[in-house]
Amino acid sequence: MKIIIALLIFAVIVFIHELGHFILAKANGVGVTEFAVGMGPKLFSFNKGETMYSIRILPLGGYCSMIGEDEASEAENALNNKTVWQRFWVLFAGPLFNFVLAFVLAIILIALIGADRAEVIDVQENSPAYKAGLQAGDIVKEYNGYTIGVGREIYISDFVDPVSDEAIDIVYERNGDRYETVLEPELLHKYYFGMTYNNNGSACEMTVVKGGAMEKAGIKTGDILLAIGDNKFSSGEEFYEYSQTNETKKDTVDVTYERDGKEYTVKVTPTENKSYYTGFTYNSNYTDVNKKVGVLGVLKYSLLEVRYQIKSVILSLKYIITGHASKDSIAGPVGIVNMVGDVYEQSSEYGVLAVLESLISFTIMISANLGVMNLLPIPALDGGRILFVIIEMIRGKKIDPDKEGFVHFIGFVLLMGLMVLVMYNDISNIFFKK
């Protein structure tokens, strides 16, 4: 079922993308030889006029094959014989339709669950946010130089530009009035044992963080925590209650644990972690804080949702290009199928409506991602073809279609090689990473 759902999402997104190219091609008199959903061998096809419509066996792509797209053609209806603006819109239509699909789905989602406002949920007393004048219920409009429409934009701005000792300029709205303030983050020194644990089981089984204090002391994942100093634990629940009232200090302590039925005691020195604290929480996802809005509000927040998705892709690309992201953070088709499975499993326990809302949200993200990625100025992608059109606009002269076609062919080969590597990485993460 999870695979079927993922394939349906792919099919819809790719169909809409190729439909954009197809509609604008037909509208501008460009000949379309084949309109295909999927890649590889044909499952079935039919012809209507000059165009063959086909469904192919691998639902991981698709294409709208146009006359004069990759090589020079003398035909009047060839893409290469159309004006620069006609070619621009035919090429731009695919990504544009992905953004339109994301917008339409956002309308459905927001009509169901309400507007995802950037609302302050809680402000801790005497915190930097408290001193800056923020209150629960305030709506953040600008944060650290970023325009904010939905709460997740605050999260992604902190992800790309982590909170530091630099002041944060905030513009917020309260009761319809706008205010400006400056938040001065506070430096915190926290100490960690470097472990997570099961707080539902009969024993406190540990999962040790690589490089953490527990690992350095020789403790391994699967060991059972029995005591920290004089405090003994017979279950994860008991340790949870202890951790809620006892803050980890920097002092070295005796930790007793069990492995293979034997008890051991080692000295553990908690690891210091410096972080900056703002002192407020905000609506960072779809929650009960969401507010039902009228028709205009739904349209407004749907546009803001698409803007957020586009912004998150661009900032994520920046994060990857600057070397801050690992290869494991990049997913291809196989990885996305696995992600759909995770979304389905996590939401299924809350009912059919929750599954529907989660899958719509996921489809919005993937459709916007596909739109942005296809606009990158890489040969063989829509963005690479558009780049050649823009160069032609600037220089006032056509680039040799055969030379352009060769560049796109090389780009296609490199993209296929990259896809193989990404799929290998996806499979490794699913089957070989613990």
Image (tube, grey):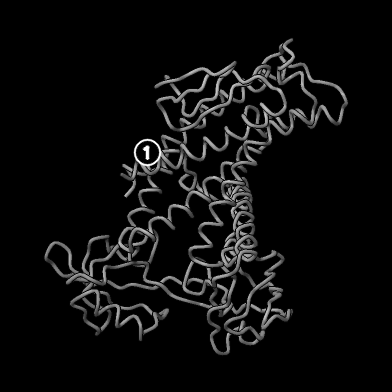
Q: Nearer the viewer, residue 225 or 101?
A: 101
The part of the image, by quadrant, that contains residue 386 is: top right
User: Taking 193 as reference, is 246 above or below it?
Assistant: below
Q: Nearer the viewer, residue 159 or 218?
A: 159
Residue that sits furthest to the top in the current view:
74
| Residue 246: percent from left, percent from top | 36, 85
Q: Residues within 10 Å of mark 1 (few under 14, many from 20)?
A: some
Residue that sits furthest to the left in the current view:
261
- At 71% from the left and 17% from the top, the residue drawn is 77
| Residue 128: percent from left, percent from top | 61, 83
User: Taking 133 as reference, is 305 above or below it?
Assistant: above
- At 62% from the left and 43% from the top, the residue drawn is 372
Q: Please state if 91 lies on the left or on the right of 121 as rendered.
A: right
User: Taking 309 as reference, is 193 above or below it?
Assistant: below
| Residue 295: percent from left, percent from top | 61, 64
Q: Please state if 255 lies on the left or on the right of 366 as rendered.
A: left
Which residue carries the number 1 mark?
427
**Figure label count:** 1
> Residue flagged by tag 1: what amino acid is it?
Ile
For residue 27, say whether it is visible. yes
| Residue 352: percent from left, percent from top | 34, 58
Q: Nearer the viewer, residue 149 or 166?
A: 149
Residue that sits furthest to the front in the current view:
49
